[in-house]
Amino acid sequence: MFKGFYTVASGMLAQQRKTEMLTNNMANANTPGFKEDQASLRAFPEMLLQRIDEGQTIPTEKGLTLPGNKRIGSLSTGVYMQEAIPAFKQGDLKETGLGTDLALLDVAMPANGSVFFTVAGPNGETQYTRNGNFTVDGQGLLTTASGLLVLDEAGNPIQLSSDQFTVNENGVLTGEGGVTARLGIGLAEDANRLIKLGDGLYRTEDGNALANAYNADGAAFKLQQGYVERSNVDVSRTMTDMMSAYRAFEANQKVLQAYDKSMDKAANEVGRIQ
């Protein structure tokens, strides 16, 4: 009976965490470049139960009984949400009319592959993002909306004289004084191996830089100036998944209440002397 409590509780916790993940997806439905998370639910390993009984009796002078094992069956130990995996599906492009807004458009990518803008993290480490909502700060440096430096192909900050510049589909940025830089674009052949940091940022597992996407075989992309990539969250499907997770939580809750009533009856009524 107590094992049933643990099994039901694990189901409730898994559905609660899935609901929190879906709520975060919904909250970022309008965040440029946001990639929705998908839940990975797994079952705990099952346990094989056996009973030790008297077993076989051997007719000897003093009598000898050998204990034996009798198989009862398997017992499920519940479910858990193993991880939340970002889905790197291309989001739709939204025209903003701002020259500082840039969008990556995947043309041909390896399976699970994706390309990213290269930025400098708060501690100087190289990080990656799909959010091309950029701006030019007071020092003429191209930055993200949160103030991180956007890097060029050589890993250096991009210095501009103003926000009047053009970017062609090959990533070449031309300012008022001529060709300024080429945007740094990294290719993750398996984007699922990236570590999500929040605020639309990612980093590699080992801290090494991603491969240069311009020289990669089997990867084709282009940049669009004056556009940003929308979030790839499907609002209607996310709402449906949230309702399903909530109803699964309620179903587990009702089972938990039934277990509680059974335990109450066993403790207070069964075996009572009338």
Image: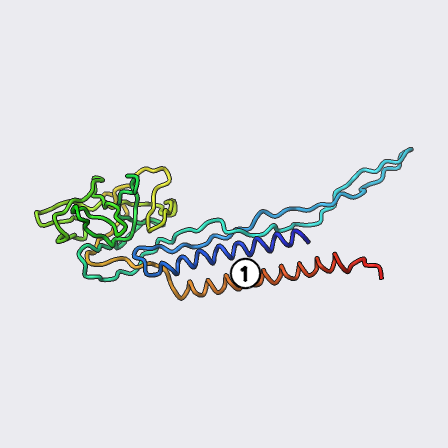
Q: How many numbered marks does the figure carry? A: 1
The answer to whether residue 273 is left or right of residue 218 is: right
Q: Is residue 62 above or below residue 79?
A: above
| Colouring style | rainbow
Quadrant containing the N terminus in the rendered view = bottom right
Q: The residue tagged with tag 1: helix, strand or loop?
A: helix
**Which residue is most to the front?**
138
Q: Position of residue 242 (x, y in %)?
A: 46, 62
The answer to whether residue 215 is left or right of residue 35 is: left
Residue beneath label 1, please?
249
Depth check, front residue: 9 or 54? 9
Q: Position of residue 253 (x, y in %)?
A: 59, 61
When asked about the image quadrant of residue 208, the answer is: top left
The answer to whether residue 54 is left or right of residue 88 is: right
Residue at left 20%, top 48%? 142
The answer to whether residue 7 is left or right of residue 115 is: right
When asked about the image quadrant of residue 251, the answer is: bottom right
Depth check, front residue: 65 or 235? 235
Q: Position of residue 192 (x, y in %)?
A: 38, 47
Residue at left 25%, top 57%? 228
Which amino acid, by three-letter code, is at mark 1?
Phe
**Which residue is most to the right?**
61
Depth check, front residue: 255 or 140? 140
Q: Dot 1: within a 10 Å radius of its alpha carbon, few (fewer than 14), some, or many (20 or more) residues?
A: many
Quadrant containing the C terminus in the rendered view = bottom right
Q: Position of residue 194 (x, y in %)?
A: 36, 45
